[in-house]
């Protein structure tokens, strides 16, 4: 389905179990991803009776593209719009990478709408190397060769173990990037601008009142584990899990371990309204 935000832009939204009475969970995408990136999480959470909501951020694959650089606050307002449209008062948020940064911003800006946050491979601030890497992504994206783009970012995204074991599978996936619409890449470039310009809120983490789980791959090159440790130390009520032999894409690289962490945390805090 599509839901219009306050600017009149269309947000692509998918739901599961919406007719049930369980807690709602929003799954918030990484910057390169779409709603289908949560394929390894959907079944396990669907079977537990949670209401599941997935959406593409403005500037992602199936949602509209904005003429202006979006903000994290703008993404948060869009989530509130989706909540209001679906009749959801508050929800758990699970976000990976860019989605985790939106989740933290949501917990800061709209604490009454957030039950818990689960942050995967994210950061609350950038450094020169991080910015350099994503600017290189932009340069490759602007060349509009999907396969070359995907192969070019692999080294800064996946861990060595995953690359070694699934390198051929990733090469096949790279070919599918040739079929993406051209505005996917312009939208990606805009999202990277948002990341570079807007991810600088470390000390605002003290304002988070919801319970939090921070998960990070030990071998994450893009957003190193030290940033997850720092976030977990600053967020008042926070648990930290570091996944061994895992890079930046824990939702693929360490599916079973990650799902165990997420499901345990969510089941423990089911019904939580703090």
Image (cartoon, helix red, strand yellow):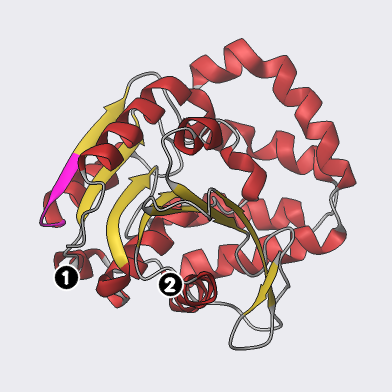
Q: Distance of mark 1 from mark 2, alpha carbons?
A: 17 Å
Asked which secondary structure carries label 1, the reply is helix
Front-most of 42 and 99?
A: 42
Q: Nearer the viewer, residue 192 or 274?
A: 274
Residue for badge 2: 198
Could you tell me residue 93's position as x and y percent?
38, 55
173 vs 111, left or right, is right
How dense is the environment of label 1, judged by Cα within 10 Å: few (below 14), some, or many (20 and up)? some
| Residue 183 visible at all | yes
Q: Position of residue 50 (x, y in %)?
A: 42, 45
Is 196 drawn above or below residue 14 in the view shown? below
* Label 2 crowd (10 A; few <14 / some 14-19 / many >=20): some
Per the image, is 45 magenta? no
Q: Split into 4 quadrants, where in the image is the C terminus? A: bottom left
Q: Which of the labelled discs sits on residue 207, or is there none?
A: 1
In the picture, the disc for residue 32 is none
Q: Residue placed at 40% from the left, 49% from the top?
A: 94
The residue under the point 64% across, 39% down is: 153
User: Residue 198 lies in what quarter of the image?
Assistant: bottom left
Q: Quadrant of residue 73?
A: bottom left
Residue span colored magenta: 235-239
Of the two numbered discs 1 and 2 on the same chain, state the one appearing first in sequence.
Answer: 2
Q: Which residue is found at the position 21% from the left and 70% from the top?
A: 204
């Amino acid at each position: 389905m599509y839901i219009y935000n306050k600017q009149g832009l269309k947000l692509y939204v998918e739901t599961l179990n919406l007719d049930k009475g369980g807690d709602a969970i929003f799954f918030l995408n990484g910057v390169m991803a779409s709603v289908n990136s949560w394929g390894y999480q959907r079944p396990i959470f669907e079977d537990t009776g949670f209401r599941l909501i997935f959406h593409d951020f403005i500037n992602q694959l199936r949602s509209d593209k904005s003429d202006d650089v979006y903000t994290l606050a703008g993404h948060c307002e869009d989530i509130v719009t989706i909540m209001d449209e679906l009749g959801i008062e508050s929800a758990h948020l699970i976000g990976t990478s860019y989605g985790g940064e939106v989740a933290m911003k949501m917990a800061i800006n709209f604490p009454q709408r957030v039950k818990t946050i689960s942050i995967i491979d994210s950061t609350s601030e950038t450094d020169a190397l991080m910015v350099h890497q994503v600017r290189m992504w932009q340069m490759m994206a602007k060349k509009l060769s999907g396969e070359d783009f995907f192969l070019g970012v692999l080294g800064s995204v996946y861990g060595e173990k995953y690359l070694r074991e699934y390198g051929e599978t990733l090469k096949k996936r790279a070919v599918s990037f040739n079929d993406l619409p051209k505005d996917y890449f312009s939208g990606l470039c805009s999202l990277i601008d948002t990341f570079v310009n807007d991810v600088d809120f470390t000390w605002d983490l003290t304002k988070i009142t919801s319970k939090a789980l921070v998960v990070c791959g030990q071998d994450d090159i893009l957003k190193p584990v030290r940033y997850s440790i720092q976030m977990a130390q600053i967020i008042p009520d926070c648990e930290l899990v570091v996944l061994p032999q895992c890079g930046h894409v824990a939702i693929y690289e360490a599916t079973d371990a990650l799902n165990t962490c997420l499901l345990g945390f969510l089941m423990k805090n089911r019904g939580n309204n703090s």
